[in-house]
Image: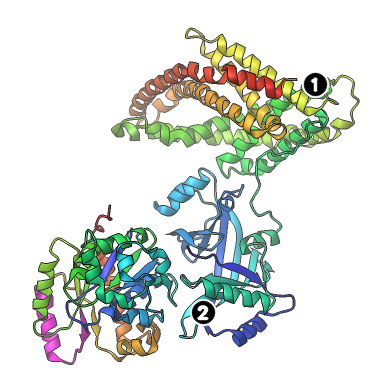
């Protein structure tokens, strides 16, 4: 076990030079050569690395993944220049890439802060002049832009030497008790992020709105929808700039959730206003659909290709090129719509309407004053029952559409459970229900995805056939279509079992008990 | 992927400890997590690193894996370079090994939990042919063998190669070389011609190397631009180059 190093801040008014003098008077020190460091830190938009207790840093030709707690290096790799944006897949193969892929998946690493610091390193010596504790006096400056530099408070970093835990504790106690140094509440990196006006930890797309069971339904619904509107706003610039595929994905999830809430809890709204906004949200989802579909094809391409036997894999290259081309066209079209007056109007009016909602007259919106727990519970029971009825009607002869319809209801139920079920009911009841729903949805999703993929591959055949290497690509696509068809049938065969678990007697009783009147 | 490197020679006083300490320092300086295990009861490298020559529980518990080896490790003055110290009880290591089951792979087993933590593990071995050296041959990926260019050194080298045949890679290098002595120059030329496995770098007999014991520091710190410091750099470069050409031995099951 390596004891963790900790940062200490200097007392008010004490200069770095004064602290060195004071240390020198109390401890046997050996000073090493001073260093100038220029570190550039990166994280994803939603702070995935920080949440995992890690930091990604570029410094003089190397990138490293460090533990934020004790600065221990987990992995490193060479990189000639600091990137403006980096994906895990673009790094040199090795441990760094593997670890990053695991944590950030398809998200891009974006510049978070650049810290320039002057450091003086000291060894604290024991009676035989051996280093038993390491101290670094760090004077960091955040380089916010070429002509904007922000000095941070100097700090002393205590570094452990293995096997000298007692000495570490002793030195730390002296720094705190004798010199009045105090433990830094925030890491140097968080401090730097704060200094530039940003939020450490990034911007989350999670919707954790605290709700009270007997809160008025219109108040609760408006606060959930306002949070969803915030998520859309937060993800819009990254969607337009095409930073990574998650921006558009999170944006669309927020739109879809908003539509589900306005549909299921429509009786808290005045009908005439709601219809207009619902139409606009639907439009927003439609104009972002093709770009998202193509994102998914591109992201899944490697997986799809691995379904082919090894010799045929490279035959699919023309398809990938076609997908890239179509994707950039779809993206351009989407950006035009997202920048339109129509979108601007929706972005301004929708949150404004949500703020006003509670002040509107109660006529025509009978659920508005009722407690949210009751109203949401009714909807959950209703959608659950609808799903049971629909699922029971499905047999081997049912058309694929019947499974698609069931899946849509499943999404609706999932959003209700996540947005209103979890905040208002005990987690140990809601979570198992969400789990069995997820298992069912996975099967239904796979069934539909395969069907959509098959249709997409068929529709791309004409485009591929005219490209160089087209005939071989067509053959490979034929093999894929066959393979995907097999998987679609397998998902369909799984359905009965998954549905039975979701619709079991125990599960039904639990839903009634938890969400019923 | 950790590599275990042992500085070894049947004879004493040929520069084993100096090589182990200076090469381990260079490995750590280049960014590798490095451990040096001072197996010699005299504890010369432990002394150089100013660490107390004390292993709680002594050699008997250590080779039977009754001690938590990770807690016995001490950090040195150099970042990333740790030491597993010597202990006076190591003088009975042969007896302790002999009394244990699987007496020839006990040291490999002690190192097993450390292999994931360190990129390089150096073993600074006592001179002899014994159960300790058999254990070292079992544990090491390569033996770094300092050889003083004198009559009979070729014979020593051949004996050693025969002794470890099929075991670790043998990387011999000249140590304590006095280039002014024509005998040294002649022997070096002969040996290099006869053995392609002989490393090119040669460590001179130099004041800086002898000063290590007085200053208790590595040569790179005492005299960074000296011939000896540069010779260790060259040796480390040479060793690494030869190691990468060969996959490490399978880790212990």
SS at badge 1: helix
| Vertical side of A91 occupied by A264: above or below | above
Task: Confirm whether the magenta stretch covers residue B177.
Answer: yes
Q: Residues within 10 Å of mark 2 (few under 14, many from 20)?
A: many
Q: Position of residue A49 (x, y in %)?
A: 56, 51
Write down the chain letter for disc 1. Answer: A
The residue segment tinted magenta is B174-195
Q: Residues within 10 Å of mark 1 (few under 14, many from 20)?
A: some
Residue picked out by circle 2: A123
Furthest residue toward front: B99
Q: Can residue B240 be seen?
A: yes
Residue at screen point 75% across, 20% down: A517
Q: Can residue A92 be seen?
A: no
Comparing A207 with B126, the one in front is B126
Furthest residue toward top: A397
Q: Which mark is residue A267?
A: 1
Task: Confirm whether the magenta stretch covers residue B190.
Answer: yes
| Vertical side of A479 occupied by A142: above or below | below
Quarter of the image where one finds residue A200: bottom right
- Between the C-alphas of marks 2 and 1, the distance is 70 Å
Residue at screen point 73% across, 36% down: A229
Q: Position of residue A234 (x, y in %)?
A: 68, 43
Query: Is A286 on the left-hand or right-hand side of A315?
Result: right
Q: Position of residue A34 (x, y in %)?
A: 54, 79
| Vertical side of A264 occupied by A203: above or below | below
Residue at screen point 56% across, 8% down: A393
SS at badge 2: strand
């Amino acid at each position: 076990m390596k004891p963790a190093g900790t940062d200490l801040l200097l007392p008010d008014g004490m200069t770095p030079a004064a602290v060195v003098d004071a240390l020198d008077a109390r401890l046997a020190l050996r000073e090493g050569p001073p260093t100038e460091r220029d570190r550039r830190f990166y994280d994803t938009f939603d702070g995935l690395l920080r949440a995992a207790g890690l930091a990604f840093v570029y410094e003089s030709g190397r990138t490293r993944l460090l533990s934020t707690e004790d600065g221990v290096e987990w992995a490193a790799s060479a990189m000639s220049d600091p990137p403006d944006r980096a994906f895990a897949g673009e790094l040199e193969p090795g441990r760094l890439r593997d670890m990053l892929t695991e944590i950030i998946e398809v998200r891009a690493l974006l510049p978070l802060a650049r810290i320039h610091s002057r450091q003086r390193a000291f060894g604290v010596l024991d009676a035989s002049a051996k280093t038993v504790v390491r101290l670094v006096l760090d004077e960091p400056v955040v380089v916010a832009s070429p002509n904007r530099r922000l000095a941070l408070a100097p700090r002393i970093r205590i570094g452990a030497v293995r096997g000298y835990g007692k000495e570490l504790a002793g030195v730390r106690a002296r720094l705190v008790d004798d010199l009045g140094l105090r433990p830094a509440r925030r890491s140097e990196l968080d401090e730097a992020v704060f200094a530039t006006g940003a939020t450490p930890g990034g911007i989350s797309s999670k919707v954790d709105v605290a709700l009270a069971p007997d809160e008025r339904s219109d108040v609760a619904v408006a606060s959930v929808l306002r949070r969803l509107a915030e998520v859309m706003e937060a993800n819009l610039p990254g969607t337009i700039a095409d930073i990574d595929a998650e921006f558009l994905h999170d944006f669309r999830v927020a739109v879809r959730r908003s539509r589900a809430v306005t549909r299921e809890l429509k009786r808290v709204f005045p009908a005439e206003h709601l219809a207009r906004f619902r139409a606009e949200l639907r439009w927003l989802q439609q104009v972002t659909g093709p770009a998202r579909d193509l994102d998914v094809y591109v992201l899944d391409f490697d997986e799809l290709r691995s379904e082919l036997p090894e010799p045929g894999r490279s035959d699919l290259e023309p398809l990938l090129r076609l997908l890239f081309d179509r994707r950039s066209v779809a993206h351009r079209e989407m950006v035009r719509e997202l920048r339109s007056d129509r979108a601007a109007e929706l972005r301004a009016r929708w949150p404004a309407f949500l703020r006003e909602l509670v002040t509107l007259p109660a006529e025509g919106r009978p659920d508005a004053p009722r407690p949210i727990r009751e109203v949401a519970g009714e909807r959950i029971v209703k959608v659950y029952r609808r799903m049971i009825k629909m699922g029971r009607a499905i047999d081997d002869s049912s058309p694929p559409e019947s499974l698609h319809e069931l899946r849509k209801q499943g999404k609706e139920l999932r959003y209700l459970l996540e947005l209103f079920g979890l905040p208002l009911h005990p987690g140990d009841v809601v979570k198992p229900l969400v789990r069995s729903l997820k298992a069912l949805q996975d099967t239904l999703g796979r069934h539909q995805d395969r069907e959509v993929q098959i249709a997409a591959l068929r529709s791309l055949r004409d485009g591929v056939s005219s490209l160089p290497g087209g005939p071989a690509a067509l053959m490979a696509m034929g093999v894929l279509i066959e393979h995907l068809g097999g998987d679609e049938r397998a998902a369909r065969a799984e359905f009965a079992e998954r549905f039975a678990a979701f619709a079991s007697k125990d599960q039904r009783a639990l839903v009634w008990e938890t969400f019923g009147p | 992927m950790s590599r275990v490197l042992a500085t070894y020679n049947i004879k004493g006083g040929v520069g084993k400890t100096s090589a182990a300490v200076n090469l381990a320092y260079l490995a750590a300086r280049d960014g590798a997590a490095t451990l040096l295990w001072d197996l010699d009861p005299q504890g010369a490298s432990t002394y150089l690193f100013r660490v107390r020559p004390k292993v709680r529980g002594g050699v008997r518990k250590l080779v039977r894996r009754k001690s938590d080896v990770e807690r016995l490790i001490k950090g040195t003055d150099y970042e990333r370079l740790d030491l597993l110290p010597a202990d006076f009880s190591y003088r009975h290591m042969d007896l302790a090994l002999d009394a244990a089951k699987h007496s020839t792979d006990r040291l490999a087993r002690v190192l097993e939990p450390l292999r994931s933590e360190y990129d390089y593990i150096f073993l600074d071995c006592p001179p002899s042919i014994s159960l300790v050296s058999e254990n070292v041959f079992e544990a090491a990926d390569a033996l770094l063998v300092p050889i003083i260019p004198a009559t009979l050194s070729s014979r020593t080298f051949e004996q050693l190669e025969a002794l470890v045949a099929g075991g670790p890679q043998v990387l011999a290098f000249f140590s304590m070389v006095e280039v002014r002595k024509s005998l040294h120059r002649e022997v070096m030329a002969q040996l290099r011609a006869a053995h392609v496995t002989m490393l090119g770098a040669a460590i001179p007999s130099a004041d800086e190397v002898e000063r290590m014991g007085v200053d208790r520091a590595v040569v790179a710190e005492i005299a960074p631009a000296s011939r000896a410091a540069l010779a260790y750099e060259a040796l480390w470069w040479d060793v690494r180059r030869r190691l990468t050409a060969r996959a490490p031995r399978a880790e212990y099951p």
